[in-house]
Image (cartoon, grey):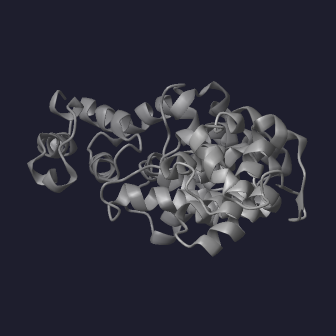
Amino acid sequence: MEALNRPGSSVGDMWNDPREAARKGLRYLGSEEAARELAKRLRGDDDHADRDYMFGLVGSPHRDAGVEQMKELLQDPEFPVCDLFLTTLSILPLDAKEPPGSLRKETDENLKAFRQRLVSALPNKRGRALAVSLDTAMAGMGPQMAPELKSKLVPQLIETFPTLPVSKQVGWLQYRWQEVKDPKWLPVLRALALKYEDFPELREMHAYESLQLSAAALTRWYELDPEWARGAVIAEHLLAADNYEIEGNLASLLFRYADGAVLPDVLKEFKKKEGNWAGDTLFQLLAYLLKVDPQTARRFSSAKLQCVARRAAGARTRFLRPSGAFTTAPSWKNWH
């Protein structure tokens, strides 16, 4: 057991991982205690390891001990019940001598019954155990979920969503969105869409899943609130633009549509260029800053920035209206 509790080796060194041999040993041990331990470790933390634990339980001569332990874990407030756990629990009571048709029917009946028991246990689950168990409970319900149950479970899913594995989050937003679509998702979607993680190797799976998640979140954000989501898209393109004309057009759109959610990204790029923007672009960016955070905008009143501003002929007291036209702004006078 000590080897199983050690930190894992690198992905590329899986076969030299001492835990691999320990898992195989536990899988084939065949004792009653081994069956119980296999059940405790089937937590959805590692797909490769979970398969060993599942096959160990299915092949154990003490499947009854495994079933007993799993039923206890189903109710444990700290235990995360993953999909494979519930599927394994539905298979273990079966008699292999029965006809295939009967086995399929009994498996489906067991799965439905254990899923209902899991739903009943959700109020006592906490933290990650609640997030994973909730995902598992809802996974088999689909669009047929009863409205009263949906109204109870969807808010819980939204609340625990960030603690789910990224692959699970992507699954909900890409493929199962219509089952849980609700305006209450907006704060979570905005946070996910605007979150950026820097990965040294973009071909690495975690990097790919992170990009998938932010893209899916932005898509669903746009569905629920197109006006504000549009601002995030514009800001992302503005910060990547390297053409003055494109910068100017995007800066104008940024002022018209973006809110304060994208302010940190805009400020980061603004500081990076040290105010070296084309004249109109500069003042349109300042218009955006003054709109969402006047105090922060005033901090950019350095001598260098004012020098750049004065080079923008006739733009010293001009400010964008939401319609895109220029107007005089009292805030601009206070900003000097």
Q: Position of residue 34 (x, y in %)?
A: 24, 34
Question: Picture quarter containing residue 18?
Answer: top left
| Viewer-proximal residue among 326 and 177 | 326
Q: Position of residue 200 (x, y in %)?
A: 31, 54
Q: Is residue 195 left or right of residue 332?
A: left
Q: Is residue 209 shown left or right of residue 150?
A: left
**Residue 80's spot in the image, x, y percent?**
49, 36
Q: Is residue 296 above or below residue 115?
A: above
Give the residue displayed 43% in from the left and 33% down from the top. 68
Q: Nearer the viewer, residue 63 or 278?
A: 278
Q: In the depicted view, which residue is nearer to us: 55 or 260?
A: 260
Q: Position of residue 150 (x, y in %)?
A: 78, 48
Q: Quadrant of the C terminus?
A: top right
- Which picture quadrant has residue 248? bottom right
Task: Say above or below: 162 vs 178.
Answer: above
* Snapshot quadrant of residue 31: top left
Residue 149 shows in this picture: no
Residue at 16% across, 40% down = 19
Count of marks overlaid on the render: 0
> Quadrant location of the N terminus?
top left
In the image, what residue occupies the spot 45% across and 59% down? 209
Q: Is residue 153 left or right of residue 7?
A: right
Residue shown at 66% from the left, 38% from the top: 301
Identify whether 300 is placed above or below 313. above
Q: Is residue 276 visible?
A: yes
Q: Is residue 242 above or below residue 18?
A: below
